[in-house]
Each structure stands twice: as structure tokens, then as C-alpha cells.
Image (cartoon, grey):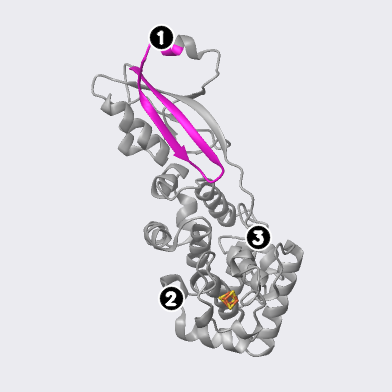
Amino acid sequence: MNVEALSRWYGHEARDLPWRATSDPWAILLSEVLLQQTQVARGLEYWRRLLDRFPTVGSMAEAELDEVMHLWQGAGYYARGRRLHALAVEVSDPSGPWKGVLPSPSTCDDVVAGFQSLPGIGPYTAAAVASIAHDVPAAVVDGNVRRVVARQTGVHEPKPADVSSLAQTWMDDAHGHGVAPSVWNQAVMELGATVCRPRAPHCSACPVQEACTARDHPDGVHAFPAPAKRRTKTERLVALVDVDAEGRPHLVQRPTSARFGGLWGPPYLPANDASLVKAQKQRSKAGDVVHLLSHRRLEVEVWVGHTERGMDPASKALSTLDERVLQTAKKA
Ligand code: SF4
């Protein structure tokens, strides 16, 4: 890997993203948590929205979880919002080790380990924030980096330990050539996101094409890395939407350990639940909603009944699935 060519390329071609213009660890942490499972354009919208309301870790700690989840609504992977709030509370705890300040070289010896000790922070986010905010030379490994490693080395299914090890070797080499860790990590990820793309790699524009094994490999670039075998499970559910005379549904808050934990929605039962027969006798079917999650297909029957008193769904944080379920109930 020609580390100088890649860092030069990044200097000219990097996308202009607002979290790249700050060294505030909280703003960078927020961007990293959001971008893990959200596309950049959408992540940008949520990043602005959250940072506007919670400019500091302390301001999120002071807020109710409900408010954080409301702002997170629509971003998906809601556990991230819950854990971020838990992280803010833990960092801001006056009797805890952090006293309101995120891990930094002035507060702990090992910044990466410091971040990893916080709720919801794994090796990727810890290395990303430590390197981008504090220039700690810790290599990140995400899907983009894994793909670049697999293609550069021509290994179909690189082992996680080998990917981490090579990514760190590149980082050390770059650091030795005077490239800042924040620049290097972002350069490799940017290459994977914009040039060494999963489906349509743009090899002729690649700054490190000379060292690439996959480029002219007889199996073709797309064979690296080998596509992951995905199994999608189907889950059948019944949503019981009881509405009052004004059309407002009865909503419950999902337990934090459940799917969409912390969000609100109508009660659900598994389609084979013994109590369903009685529940359906008191309601009528309004329709079906099929909703796809990353590894799950949810097939939801929507049944509508009556309640004395519902609540305004606009005042609650709902998942996209529950918004669709309520829409289906409303149409009936
Ligand atoms: S030459 Fe092509 S396959 Fe190789 S790293 Fe560059 S973009 Fe990826």
C-alpha cells in the first residue's frame, strides 16, 4: 500500500462533511455512531438535529431518554440512541471516573480502552473517535476497510485478526511517513466508500491500484471479499391497535431490552399466541404490513379495536414499522 499516494488523494478528493471540520470529540462520536448503520445523507440530517439539541455530552445526559429517542425517530437501529444516552449519563456522572469529559489523552492513558469501556462503544467507534479527535494511531476496521484489505491482498475471506493487523501495519507506516492518524483512518474508509465500492469499484481512479491484487484477478474484483451468506428469518406478528372516539391509539412504551426498546407503539403478539383468539374476537382486521429489518422480515397483521382513551402518536417516538401499522389502522 502506497500510504503517501492514498493520503494525498484523500487531501484532494475527500467529501466535504461537517464532522470533518471539527475536532470536538462529542460531535465526532455522534457522527461515528450515526454513520455505522445510516447512510451519509441521512446521517448528516440526524447529526445536525442531535447536535443542535445536544451540543455537549452533558446536555444529552440531562435530557430524558424519551426526548433522545424522539429525535432519533426514523434513523433506525434504536439501540444506538439508547446506548448513547446511557453513555452521556455515565460520562456526566459526578461520582464516576469521567466527570463530564469524554476520554482523552489528558484524562486517561489508553484513550481507545477508555472509549471502549463506555456503553455501546465497540472497537471501531473507539478507534475512530480516538484517532479522529485525538490523533491516536489506532487503526479502524469497518466494512470499507475490510473490503480494501481483501482486494489489496487478494484474500477472499480475510480473517478479522488479519484485517486488523494489516490495517494497523498501514496505520503505523502512514504515521511513520508523517500522515496524521485522523487523516489515515478517514482516507482508507473514504477509499472504500467512494472508489473501492462494493458493487462498482472505480479501479482506474484508484490511488493505490498498482499494489492491488484483486484488480486483475481472474475471479474479478467483486469476488473480494466473498459475499456474506445472509439468512433472513420471517417473524409473524399481530398488532392490536385500539383507538378512542377521536381516533387516537392506545400506545405502550417498549421495554429497553425489546426490539425498538424505548420507543412507543401498539401492543404486539406473536401470530401463534394462545391469547390471540380472544383478542381478535373483540377487534377487526385492518390489513397487513410487511417490514424488512437487516436480518428479519416482519409480517404484521393489523387488528383494530376500541379503547376509552388513546394518546397523540405525534407526541411519542415511534419506529417506522409502528408508523406504518398506525397508518394501516387509520385507513380501516
Ligand atoms: S484497484 Fe480497484 S479493487 Fe483495488 S483497491 Fe483500488 S478500487 Fe479497490
* Circles 1 and 3: CB atoms closer than 8 Å: no
Amino acid type at mark 1: Lys
Q: Quadrant of residue 144?
A: bottom right
Of the residues tagged 1 and 3, which is closer to the observer?
3
Looking at the rendered structure, the secondary structure element under dot 1 is helix
Looking at the rendered structure, the secondary structure element under dot 2 is loop
* Frontmost residue, 41 versus 65: 41
Q: Residue at x 69, y 73 (%)?
A: 167
Q: What residue sits right under mark 3 in the picture?
A: 226
Asked if residue 304 shows in the view, the reply is yes
Q: What residue sits right under mark 1 in the picture?
A: 281
Q: Quadrant of residue 265?
A: top left
Of the residues tagged 2 and 3, which is closer to the observer?
3
Asked if residue 127 shows in the view, the reply is no
Q: Is residue 86 left or right of residue 314?
A: right
Amino acid type at mark 2: Arg
Q: What residue sits right under mark 2 in the picture?
A: 15
Q: Is residue 122 left or right of residue 241?
A: right
- Chain part drawn in magenta: 279-305
Q: Quadrant of residue 316?
A: top left
Chief secondary structure of the magenta portion: strand
Ligand 1 picture quarter: bottom right
